[in-house]
Image: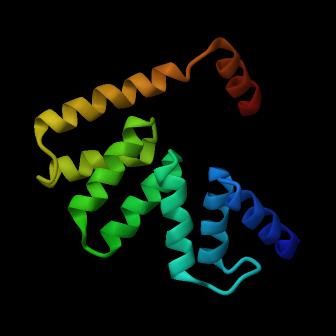
Amino acid sequence: GDYDGAIEYFKKAAGLGDLGAHYELTVMYRNRHGVEKDKKKEVYHLEKAAIGGNPRARHNLGCHESERCRYERAVKHWIIAANLGHEGSMQNVKEAYRGGLVSKEDFDSVLRVHQAAIDATKSPQRDEAEAFAAR
């Protein structure tokens, strides 16, 4: 693809505070799409997107912390993402609960908030679109 054009666009958009652009730059720096692999820039943009409320970025930041054996920090990120409705993070919180890193009270709370976030995104239009896409 036209990575040079995309990089410039995403850098400008990120400079204006676009969270999606920060997330896309994370992916580009991680996968060397049009740029040299740069862990520092990858994490910088990941943190910007996560702090801004991007659930995928928050989940990936938890994974980044987990890879560095900083499990308490990882779990905190996954809890935030799960509370935003991110299914992968909910699964990671469940595993952390099984491993003793999350209390029963905290797990129950995350489960309730996660379900509420999922329920808040439900609509007849979304159900129709998903049924159409499944055809």
Q: Is residue 116 left or right of residue 52?
A: left
In depth, the one of 128 and 45 nearer the eye is: 45
Q: Is residue 103 left or right of residue 95?
A: left
Quadrant of the frame with the C terminus: top right
Q: Is residue 14 left or right of residue 118?
A: right
The tally of labels here is 0
Q: Residue at x 43, y 54 (%)?
A: 59
Scheme by which the image is coloured: rainbow
Query: What residue occupies the far front of the structure in this picture?
Result: 16
Answer with the quarter of the image where residue 130 lies: top right
Answer with the quarter of the image where residue 87 lies: top left
In depth, the one of 77 and 14 nearer the eye is: 14
Is residue 66 in view? Answer: yes
Residue 106 to residue 13: above or below: above
Query: What residue occupies the far top of the structure in this picture?
Result: 124
Is residue 90 in view? Answer: no
Give the image location of residue 27, x and y in percent: 62, 67
Q: Residue at x 65, y 19 (%)?
A: 127
In depth, the one of 5 and 95 nearer the eye is: 5
Q: Residue at x 82, y 73 (%)?
A: 3
Residue 35 to residue 109: above or below: below
Answer with the quarter of the image where residue 64 lies: bottom left
Q: Residue at x 65, y 12 (%)?
A: 124
Residue 7 to residue 39: above or below: above
Residue 37 to residue 130: above or below: below
Quadrant of the frame with the N terminus: bottom right
Give the image location of residue 17, x and y in percent: 65, 53
Give the image location of residue 134, x and y in percent: 71, 32
Give the image location of residue 52, x and y in percent: 52, 48
